[in-house]
Image: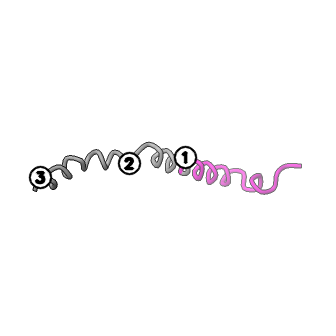
């Protein structure tokens, strides 16, 4: 039973390690990039794949 109590104490540390900054930054940066692409494409639909001559 001592091990079970120890595992419960390590649970918050494991959660903090699992939710580290790198995955959070990855999700945020991908979300910002997709949102920027959607907004830019809504206002200037032809500039993304057909650049001005």
Residue with the mark numbered 2: 19
Q: For the residue labelled by badge 2, is the local secondary structure a helix, a strand or a loop?
A: loop
Rendered image quadrant of residue 20? top left
Seen at 66% across and 49% down, the residue is: 40
Say which residue appears at 14% left-offset and 51% top-offset.
Answer: 5
What x and y, as percent, mark residue 28?
A: 50, 47
* Disc 1/disc 3 C-alpha distance (Å): 42 Å
Residue 53 lies, in percent from the top left, at: 89, 49
Query: Magenta residues, as a range?
Result: 31-53
The image shows residue 48 at horizontal and vertical percentages of 74, 53
In this rendering, the count of numbered labels is 3
Which numbered disc, 1 or 3, marks the residue closer to the eye? 3
In the picture, the quarter occupied by the N terminus is bottom left
Q: In this view, does 38 lie above or below 13?
A: below
Q: Point out which mark residue 2 bears.
A: 3
> Within the magenta stretch, is there residue 9?
no
Residue placed most toward the observer, 2 or 14: 2
19 vs 26, left or right, is left
The residue under label 1 is: 29
Of circles 3 and 2, the one toward us is: 3
**Residue 13, label in figure:** none
Residue ID at (61%, 48%) = 36
> Mark 2, mark 1: which one is toward the viewer?
2
Using the numbered discs, state the Cα–Cα distance from disc 2 to disc 1 in whole angstroms: 16 Å
């Amino acid at each position: 039973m001592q091990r079970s109590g120890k595992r419960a104490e390590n649970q918050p540390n494991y959660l903090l390690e699992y939710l580290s900054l790198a995955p959070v930054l990855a999700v945020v940066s991908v979300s910002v990039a997709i949102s920027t692409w959607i907004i830019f494409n809504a206002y200037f639909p032809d500039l993304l794949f057909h650049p001005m001559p």
